[in-house]
Image: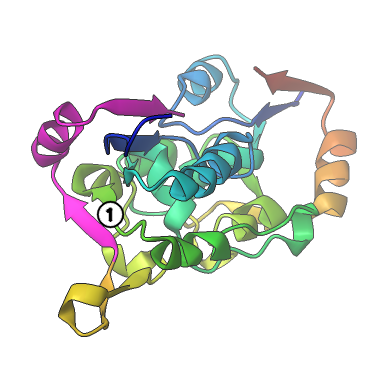
Amino acid sequence: MDGEGQTKKFMFVNRKVPYGTVYALESLEVVLISAAFDQDVSLAFVDDGVYQLKDGQSTDGIGMKNFSPTYKALGDYDINKLYVEKESLEERGLSVDDLMELTYEDEDDDWAEKSSIILVSRDELAEVMDQQDVVISS
Amino acid sequence: MAMLHIVNKSVFERGTLDSCLKTSLSGSSILFIEDAVVSAVNNTSVSDKIKSELSSKNFYVLTPDLNARGFTDADLIEGIKGVDYDGFVDLVTDNSNVQSWL
């Protein structure tokens, strides 16, 4: 293998409610694996995908593992751009306050704790999406 | 005959609930399970549509599925009842027939 590889922008788009299907968990696991490759990774939560970040998930009653805490670990893996679409929240009667608090420590700013969630409009998300080298949608 | 209609996909993802509402008779019961439970939460873009059916049909949500997604019975559209798995069984036995919509 010669020299350093090129860094690419990877975006993982999430559009499904968690637990009813396995898409949310599978996508999150791929994201964690991608962290090992030092690429420019971001996530987008659109349509029903916003429910993946909903706080207060309690899964004992359905006998499945609550994997929502895993989103909180993303910051430690340098994955700190989680785009959440405004219109998707509004259609569902939700606001950013209904979501989990996801943060990272900015090494360029004295390790200040900042929010990883970036609230964007549909139009803004379209622009960001268009800039990506690789988009994986689930 | 009172049919129990079971819907398991989110109203925002699939037209199942719309088809179900259009093809269910007055007096029938509609149960939301799995991802469909988010359809029954209050203040969404579809809440008014569901509210307009409350007077003619009985609506239920499987509470464990609701809790898994971060909601409680208190978040439901008023008039929709949460049931647990035992309640799910009761609904099946109390109704004449069951349709689990794809």
| Residue at point 33%, 36% (across, down) | A3
Amino acid carrying label 1: it is: Lys
Quarter occupied by residue A18: top right
Helix, strand or loop under label 1 = loop
Tag 1 subunit: A
| Residue at point 25%, 74% (across, down) | A106
Left or right: A106 in relation to B30: left
Q: Position of residue B76 (x, y in %)?
A: 50, 57
Q: Position of residue B42 (x, y in %)?
A: 40, 54
Q: Quadrant of the N terminus of chain A?
A: top left
Left or right: B18 in relation to A66: left
For disc 1, the neighbor class at 10 Å (few under 14, some 14 to 19, many from 20) is many
Quarter occupied by residue A103: bottom left
Magenta span includes A120: yes
Magenta span includes A29: no
Left or right: A71 in relation to A114: right
Q: Position of residue A78 (x, y in %)?
A: 36, 60
Which residue was labeled with disc 1? Answer: A81
Closer to the camera in the image, A18 or B11: A18
Left or right: B6 in relation to B37: right
Quarter occupied by residue A132: top left
Tell me if residue B49 can be seen. no
Closer to the camera in the image, A5 or B59: A5
Q: Total marks drawn?
A: 1
Q: Is residue B88 above or below residue A55?
A: above
Closer to the camera in the image, A81 or B9: A81
Highlighted magenta segment, given as a residue range:
A116-138
